Image: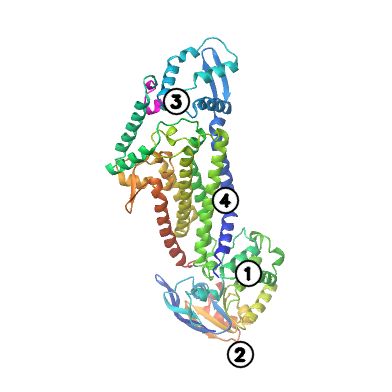
Amino acid sequence: MHNFGTLYVYELKKICKRKIVWITMGILIAIAAFMGAAEPLNHAYSITTGQNRVEMNGFEYLAFDKEIAQMQDGRKIDDVLLTEVKEHYQKIDAYQTDTVMDEDTFVENEKQRNRYRRIYRYVSYIMGNNDAVYRIDADTLYQTRMENLQESWTEQLLTEEEKSYWLEIEAAIEKPFIYGYADGWETILEEFLSLNVMLVLAIAICLSAVFSDEHLRKTDALILSSKNGKKSLFFSKMAAGVTFGLGSGVALLLTTILSTLWVYGTEGADIAVQICLPICAWNLTMKQAVLLMSAVYVIAGIFCSIITMFLSEAMKNGIAVMGIMVGSMMATMFVDIPYYFREISQIYELLPTVLLRVWQLWDYRLVNLFGVKLTNMQAAPGIYAAVSILLMALGSRIYKNYQVGGR
Amino acid sequence: MELILDRLSKQYKNKIAVDRVSLRLKPGVYGLLGANGAGKTTLMRMICGILKPTSGTVSLDGRDVTAEEYRAALGYLPQDFGYYPEFTGWDFLLYMAALKGQNKACAKRKTKELLKLVALEDVAKKKIKTYSGGMKQRLGVAQVLLNEPQLLVLDEPTAGLDPKERVRFRNLIAELGKENIVLLSTHIVSDIEHIADEVLLMKDGQLIYQGAWDEQKGDLEEFYLEQFGEEGYNA
């Protein structure tokens, strides 16, 4: 009997019974839970217009802002809406009165005064100009967005073939966009970078000793001289580590998603991603974008687990492995390779600690894998799988051939 | 059943740790004696397949040392080895049983039996980190026996055992040696005198004596000290 299942359970037990694992995961899950509520918890707001002023804590302001944002929910960003916005901002000074109001009246007045501010910001962002709202029409808005896209394509040194690929996708995106409040989903998209940092940290701390500890504790002699110690055990250890990576990744992800949606609300799941990320060319809703990032995040977590365990066996030193994992993760936070060095930059963008940045959703460069054109996020899982198989084969060889000597 | 070592050697850069050792061992207890650095542990590691010889072969009834079937018949107690501190004695033995290829039912039965045999059944559910040195050593002995091995390789098995435990252990070894090959190394000459059917004496990587030892040949300890001089005292 090769007892893969039994050994897998024991290996998982070995990982999970370490005190450092519980401490690390406890702290990281607490951070993940806090992440969603960080903005309202850390800020207080003061709104002043004319002689009137109101103080709000983060959560009160969030509710206030959400109500304003939802005033235009479900409306098409077309000429009708843009004309309303223009007219509103032309007479906005009328709301600014020196009359002292009671707090409720003032807050209500502020809501009405700001009822188009999300559309105003959206137009300003695309046009790159705060005054654009006074002279904009829908055609100009969408035309400018397209020009922004094409500018990015040029900047990213896209080939004509790649441009045609994206033009085709762009054509399929329904316009005019329908506005909707989706702050919860947008915040989640922005949190993936921090989530990934936390996951890599958890994996580095908890899995770096999976193999090295056997050598350090001198249990290697026992296991390598047993029937299943040379083959089954290696894969049981790998499977247990991958399960841990997957489990901790999902735990951190769910904590973040739930806490964020609890704070911001679940509204906006089905609006186009372009409402929050105007120059994104993917034909996705916010919910789909979060799902896509979640899948990539989980796959990257599995990949990092395999790299960590491979290094644990290859180096036989848990601290060194932890140093490499955390060090390389931190390096990728500071290093950015310009688009000019296209191949190197594109390979760099495929690293698991780089791939989860939200701006990957507007990285238009494609990877040609055996004639199939894929974006970085589509190509990464396949590349990770291939590298993982290679690392597993190499790791298994190193493990099997280890010589217990010189003690 | 026969364990065959054929011109087994291990060389590290400019040092020969084991030098062309050839042996044919049938069921019985073999006591391996030698000073520190004589090559006993290196020889045992090669017999257990965890250290590759520079040259030579090891086989048990035609099964090569690198084969899974060879390891299935092996029980090894290393000289200095660790445990999983967060595991209980019970968990540790079940884990080792899985490593040795036993099914769950058999593993549980053997674990229970062996914990009783090594007098650890009362602390079976306690974490190993709470065990004394002697208790850990007894747990190590129990794991050797899990797969009912035909070949037992025991490196300093009596280290850490108190005199009472040592006597119990000697009896157990003597019993096991009736049907299996038991190779044990120790610094304690009296252990060998009491239980070994044959004595193997190693010096500088070479086997300098192999054979049964009886009273007619004199005192084994004296012979040992004669061979090793100052080294023997330090061993």
Chain bearing tag 3 is A
- Mark 4 to mark 1 CA distance (whole Å): 29 Å
Lateral position of residue A386 relative to residue B170, left or right: left
Q: Which residue is mark 1?
A: B107
Residue type at mark 2? Gln
Chain bearing tag 4 is A
In terms of sequence position, does the residue under pointer 1 or pointer 2 come before the other? 1
Observer-nearest residue: A217 or B124? B124
Q: Which mark is residue A119?
A: 3
Residue type at mark 4? Val
Observer-nearest residue: B135 or A399? A399
Chain bearing tag 1 is B
Image height of A376 relative to B142, above or below: above
Query: Quarter of the image containing the C terminus of chain B?
Result: bottom right
Observer-nearest residue: B135 or A377? A377
Residue shown at 55%/14% (left/top)?
Answer: A52
Observer-nearest residue: A7 or B81? A7
The majority secondary structure of the magenta stretch comes to helix
Q: Secondary structure at mark 3?
A: helix
User: Are discs 4 and 2 located on one and the same chain?
Assistant: no
**Residues in magenta?**
A123-132
Q: Residue B12 placed where, x, y %? A: 42, 70
Q: Are marks 3 and 4 in contact (CB under 8 Å)?
A: no
Determine if residue A31 is in view: no
How many numbered marks appear? 4
Image height of B168 relative to A9, above or below: below
Q: Which residue is mark 2?
A: B216
Q: Residue A198 placed where, x, y %? A: 50, 44
Closer to viewer: mark 1 or mark 2: 1
